[in-house]
């Protein structure tokens, strides 16, 4: 993957992760799936044309959100 595409995906993933954390902060666990799915769908629209054609944009976004989450927690 080209560097500028990866950087753009990571930037969107950082914003998405921040939105997810803010949205689920005071919500009960059963609602987390619905909230996270809605936010992923919202942010996926901004990267539809970026990722390579091997996987859908939403899967790339999920991958990078998880990667950034692990980086922020110091697990990488």
Image (spheres, helix red, strand yellow):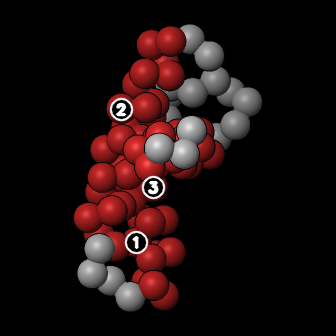
Q: Which residue is mark 3?
A: 40
Residue 46's image quarter? top left
Q: Quadrant of the N terminus?
A: top right
> Which of marks 3 and 2 precedes in the sequence?
2
The foreground one among 38 and 10 is: 10
Q: Position of residue 9 (x, y in %)?
A: 45, 30
Give the CA separation, mark 2 to mark 1: 20 Å
41 to the left or right of 54: left
Q: How many residues crowd around disc 3 within 10 Å: few (fewer than 14), some, or many (20 or more)?
A: many
**Residue at point 73% right, 30% down?**
54
The foreground one among 7 and 57 is: 7
Q: What label does residue 44 carry, if any? A: none
Q: Position of residue 16 (x, y in %)?
A: 36, 49
Describe the element under mark 1 as helix, strand or loop.
helix
Q: Which residue is mark 2?
A: 11
Q: How many residues crowd around disc 2 within 10 Å: few (fewer than 14), some, or many (20 or more)?
A: some
Q: Quadrant of the C terminus?
A: top right
**Residue at point 45% right, 55% down?**
40
Q: Position of residue 67 (x, y in %)?
A: 54, 41
Asked if residue 47 is positioned above or below residue 42 in the image, the reply reads above
């Amino acid at each position: 993957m080209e560097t500028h595409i990866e950087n753009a995906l990571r930037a969107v993933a950082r914003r998405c992760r921040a939105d997810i954390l803010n949205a689920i902060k005071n919500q009960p666990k059963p609602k987390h799936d619905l909230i996270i799915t809605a936010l992923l769908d919202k942010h996926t629209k901004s990267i539809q044309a970026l990722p390579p054609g091997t996987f859908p944009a939403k899967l790339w976004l999920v991958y990078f959100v998880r990667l950034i989450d692990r980086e922020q927690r110091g697990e990488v």
